[in-house]
Image (tube, helix red, strand yellow):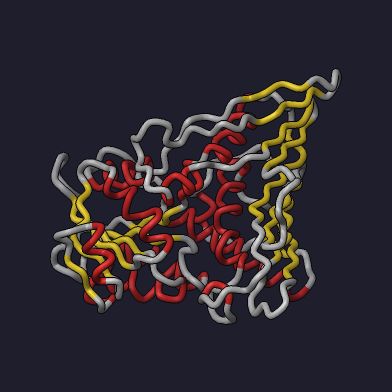
Amino acid sequence: MFEVGRTIRVGLIGYGYAGKTFHAPLIQSVPGLELTVVGSSKHDTVLANFPGVTVCSNMEEAATHPEVDLLVIASPNESHYPLAAAALHAGKHVVVDKPFTVKLADARSLVQLAEERGQLLSVFHNRRWDSEVLATKAVVESGLLGEITHFETHIDRYRPQVRRRWREQAGPGAGLWFDLGPHLIDQVVQLFGLPQTINASFAVLRKGGEADDWAHVQLNYSSLRVILHTSLLVSGGVPRSVLHGTRGSWAKFGGDVQEKQLVAGVLPGSPGFGDDPDPGIFFDGETGKQAKVPAPRVNQADYYVGIREALWGRQPNPVPPEQASAVMSILETSFQSGATGRVLPIELTHKERAAFAVSQY
């Protein structure tokens, strides 16, 4: 690891939506991290935003560049495994955008490689620092609802036209569930631990669609049922998160605002950044009375603060790779369930199970 206070040189592969909107500005906002190399074909765009960085059109060159200590991979999903493996072999610490990899076996291979080499490997599960997610967590931990029996969470969008981009075309790692499923799964296992079984259904509902654009997945615990849903044909009208318990219910309609702020050029630390104006609503089971529950102020840059602190040896990895490979196992099992129409158990390694605290569920 690094001496406390030493600048950590960061390489970023991919300057598309994820790299430009999330990773670059979040890295830029964290003292101690310096963006030095960007792997991208958008040479002029990168230099216009980050004068002085080295731009590599060859992605493997960026992954192994001598001026990089920490490599961040925000390229198409199928490239995650080979680029991460190349960087680890070159002695780099690595952050991979979600999904970790396309295949579970590749995720586990990277975990083992990083462990053998003593290097940090982490996955950018940035929604752990979302207002909606942390508001849900606060309600669960408060005991306000009593014993939680049902949790339902949606990430729905209205995009009726199929766009010509790799995420919406047939191919490895494409489709809506590969894109948003890791977010939803990670939220659930952070709240309730690992499920026992899973049953799932997927569909292509838009005319001309090539990859799934509708997903409905159920995670089963002994005394809890969780519904994860995402669709590209929903224009509104349903809450994003709902909790039901023995004392009442809670719902939140508005989502986190950080993505919209980052798209608009508002950087972490700016006035109002991460302030969610939409409170959750508590519904008292006995009286039916309603009460607003404010959402917390949040900052996704805290993920990269955690990475810096881990590399300085002051804190643990904010997203250990064993947790991310467990998410991949649930993701892969959900696709198997959807293909076979069966309720399936989750197969996890001992280390993946040990990465999560014991849950009452």
Note whether 128 is above or below 44 in the view shown: above
- Give residue 64's position: percent from left, percent from top: 21, 71
The answer to whether one can see residue 351 in this image is: no
Residue 173: x percent and y percent?
53, 73
Q: Nearer the viewer, residue 245 or 304?
A: 304
Q: Quick check: 343 left or right of 70?
A: right
Which of the 4 image quadrants contains residue 16? bottom left
Query: Front-most of 189 and 177?
Result: 177
| Quadrant assignment for the C terminus | top right
Q: Nearer the viewer, residue 106 or 357?
A: 106
Q: Quadrant of residue 314?
A: top left
Whole-percent x and y of residue 281?
Answer: 70, 28
Instruction: From the viewer's perspective, tell me whether residue 353 is left or right of residue 150.
Output: left
- Residue drawn where x is 52% and y is 29% of the image: 296
The image shows residue 188, relative to residue 79, as above or below, that is above
Q: Is residue 205 left or right of residue 118?
A: right
Q: Viewed as shown, does residue 109 lie left or right of 276? A: left
Name which quarter of the figure residue 120 lies in. bottom left
Does any portion of residue 81 appear in the rendered image?
A: yes
Say if 90 sits above or below 271 in the image.
Answer: below
Residue drawn at x 78%, y 69% is 342
Residue located 34% across and 35% down the image = 269
Count of marks overlaid on the render: 0
Instruction: Determine the residue positioned at 31% across, 67% down.
Output: 13
Image position, residue 32 (x, y; %):
20, 44
